[in-house]
Image: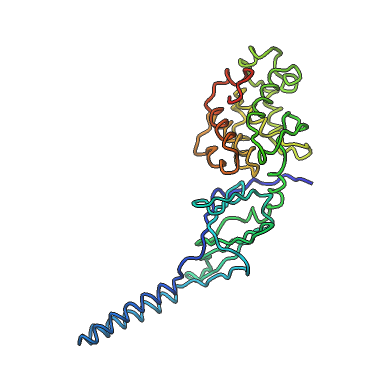
Amino acid sequence: MLRRLPPPDFRYVWLHPERGSTGAFAAAGTAGLAGISAACWSAGSQALSLGLMAMGSALGVLALARAEPRLPVQRGAREVTMAVVPWGILVNPDTDLRVLRWPAVRRVRVDVSHTMRGGTPAVVSSLVTVHTERDVLAGRAAGAVDLERLLANLEGYAQEAARPVAGDIEGQTALGDGVTEPIAAELLQAADAVCTTSRGSAQLALPGGGYRTAATRAAAPETVSVLRSALAWSHDCPADPRPLAAILAGELGAAELVPELLRLASSPHPVAAAFGKAAALRLGAPPNRAGSIDEVAAFLFEEDVEIGKQWIACSPALSLRPGAEAC
């Protein structure tokens, strides 16, 4: 059964394959100094040669003393560049991008290496191993990685991200999940339907009237209460009403709901997060707090990203007119 979970508290954790170790650099540097020393000795500069040899030895000892222990990779794992974000994992984001949503991730493990600094243990490096149905991927980071919440809630995040998006405020009618086909246009049409039908108006405690008066409606306290309830975790619903509730909050100017929308912006569900960000920005939330839809773009269809961006800047007077799919 789905349960309410704290949202991801990490924003962007960068991981990379193993690079040259400190020990290797130390060996290369020592070998180079040894070669120069030998040349100086052959040229008759014994004093300079001995000095270089002593310097090389000292540098080698110091580098090896500071060298961090190498964390072993699980057998069969492939080291790659990865970025862990609230909506999943981006594999090779700078080259051949592969997107792993949370439902595709079976397990995540973090191993760390420690050292003593001033008598206090400190994490010097981390190794993150990601298991999917077919692959085992690994990436490294200097220092600690703040993925404790992911390790504790991965299964719950996967379940939340896999929920279909609701086309009604009660979460009874599923539109889709935004994974197999675009969904933004359907969501905006559903929002228009809620605001322009008698049933929808009754659910939101809006005054009656057609679409000509819908554009002038504002969110009454009762409406804000209904939307706040829908933006909360509705785990008993067959579908997720939060994206639709976020759109309605933006359409009706419910600025009181910006705190709830900012929390939704870090949801592990990409569509919910995208419209949480979009609605918060539309209602005037600072971009440095709400972020942007581009942060979630890799997990959405391009059409949904473009519609979301247009909707942020679109006038509410246009967004409730029939046929205005992009507003």
Q: Residue at x 59, y 32 (%)?
A: 258
**Residue 82, x across and y down, in percent:** 55, 55
Q: Residue furthest left?
A: 44
**Residue 313, x across and y down, in percent:** 52, 26
Q: Residue at x 63, y 29 (%)?
A: 185
Q: Is residue 67 above or below residue 47?
A: above
> Which residue is at the front of the view, 123 or 196?
196
Quadrant assignment for the C terminus: top right
> Which residue is at the front of the view, 191 or 43?
43
Q: Residue at x 64, y 53 (%)?
A: 150
- For residue 283, what is the image quadrant? top right
Question: Number of numbered discs present?
Answer: 0
Q: Is residue 245 above or below residue 93?
A: above
- For residue 151, what is the image quadrant? bottom right
Q: Residue at x 65, y 14 (%)?
A: 211
Residue 163 can be seen, yes or no:
yes
Left or right, 21 with reference to 37: right
Residue 290 can be seen, yes or no:
no
Q: Is residue 274 above or below residue 53?
A: above
**Residue 93, x across and y down, in percent:** 52, 51
**Residue 171, x across and y down, in percent:** 75, 33
Rendered image coloring scheme: rainbow
